[in-house]
Amino acid sequence: MSKGITSKNDDYSAWYNDIVIKADLAEHSSVKGCMVIKPYGYSIWEKIQAVLDQKFKDTGHSNAYFPLFIPKSYFSKEAAHVEGFATECAVVTHYRLKNDGNGNIIVDETAKLDEELIVRPTSETIIWNTYRGWIESYRDLPLLINQWANVVRWEMRTRLFLRTTEFLWQEGHTAHATAQEAIEETERMLDVYADFAENWMAVPVVKGKKTPTERFAGALDTYCIEALMQDGKALQAGTSHFLGQNFAKAFDVKFTSKEGKQEHVWATSWGVSTRLIGALIMAHSDDAGLVLPPKLAPIQVVIVPIYKGEEDLAKITKFVDELSFKLKGMGISVKYDSRDSQRPGFKFAEYELKGVPIRLAIGGRDMENGTVELARRDTREKFTVQQEGLDIYVANLLNEIQENIYKKAHQFREDHITEANSYDEFKTLLDQKTGFISAHWDGNADTEKRIKEETKATIRCIPLNNKQEEGTCIVTGKPSTQRVLFARAY
């Protein structure tokens, strides 16, 4: 199997695209800006969904579903929100097509909607309009709802998984009786995302707050997890927003308190998307293809028989059936690839490209010796292992691989967080070392804007529990009480 993958050191963007396409994760659709997620890619998303969905339920949330279409008037009720999304909205204006008499299908100009519908870029407005009918008293709170859905944000420049016009995600929307409860929810869900990123995706993240200019449209505070990719660029992997009472006031969502007073509820929203698959690829993979952490790998162990005849194959298959039964009983996903249409070497390359954590190869001589050849994807090492106790060995090795992938990514991140104490040093680090740059900033939006315009770097976050230290802004020289994290980002 010819991989034909561009080296990431030669062209990181082409390398990324090659892996997405050649590992059968996704492909460009005939609909401009949209992607087709192929079965292998979608199976990774299903694993992500399953873990997160359980975490949401464990923290008291329930799933619901809200309309894809949002009346345009809903957006105008929250000024910052509509301003934040206005340039990205797809708008439905008509509801019927007709034949023009010449065999062409055209829009029926007489079927114009009384009010245009927005294809949801996010669901705050439709959900808060709905919550008005769900919430009456403090007994209805907290209201903890999650939605798995697709959204549309019109994009001119797209990249598979990272930025497409339509993408899949989950969005949580919660209502609370007090500001403190809503803030606690916002922080709780950020912790859920961070735990998932580090312990399932094996991606180390920095938890922090966005600056006012980088907040979600309509939020009082936006919390985020920021990850670092192997090219030194940052990727926002998840966000959790404290919305205050903005949407409750815009849609008149009130409750009767224990004291009998009418009050507006306090709100949060939070979400992650299929961009997490892009993060998985860019954080771990190499020039041979995908490297998947075992916890999210659709196939954790692949077994390839090497045989000369049917008798050989039968013996190997008997052993594999017994081993597979044990592994599956331990919750490990196994694939036995006994296709005779492809040679073993082709299969080895295919599963290496697809990032399968462990590959076992078993031949006639292995059966005689009671051994198997094992290859681990993270280090690309190959060695011989005894068949006896192989199920326990594999289970332990999967845990070791998960930990090793995280440690490697964590070490890379630590090696690429650098302090800058002047603007010249800052720009040199951006161009020569890349990664996160920890630097003082005067808190001024104009300074932030200047840095972005001149260097294409943004403040990724103000880390939570940040060390307070006296310093001066690298650009203006004005006083600063803490460093923030800058980076160029996806």
Image (cartoon, grey):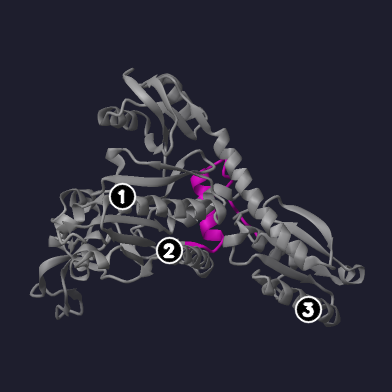
Q: Earlier in the sequence, mark 3 or mark 2?
A: 2
Mark 1 vs mark 3, foreground winner is 1
Q: Residues within 10 Å of mark 3 (few under 14, many from 20)?
A: some
Q: Which mark is residue 56?
A: 2
> Total number of numbered labels?
3
Mark 3: amino acid: Thr
Q: Quadrant of the C terminus?
A: top left
Mark 1: amino acid: Gln
Magenta-tinted stretch: 2-26
Secondary structure, mark 2, is helix
Q: Residues within 10 Å of mark 1 (few under 14, many from 20)?
A: few
* Mark 3 and mark 2: Cα distance apart in space: 41 Å
Secondary structure, mark 3, is helix
Q: Which residue is mark 1?
A: 180
Q: Residue at x 63, y 49 (%)?
A: 405
Q: Is residue 157 left or right of residue 400?
A: left
Q: Is residue 87 left or right of residue 207?
A: left
Mark 2 vs mark 1, foreground winner is 1
Q: Position of residue 363 (x, y in %)?
A: 84, 70
Q: Residue at x 54, y 48 (%)?
A: 283
Residue 377: quarter of image: bottom right
The stretch drawn in magenta includes residue 251: no
Mark 3 vs mark 2, foreground winner is 2
Whether residue 167 is visible to the viewer of this picture, yes or no, is no
Q: Quadrant of the N terminus?
A: bottom right
* Mark 1 and mark 3: Cα distance apart in space: 60 Å
Q: Position of residue 483 (x, y in %)?
A: 41, 28
Mark 2: amino acid: Phe
User: Is 14 or 83 nearer to us in this picture?
Assistant: 83
Q: Which residue is mark 3?
A: 317
Secondary structure, mark 1, is helix
Q: Residues within 10 Å of mark 2 (few under 14, many from 20)?
A: some
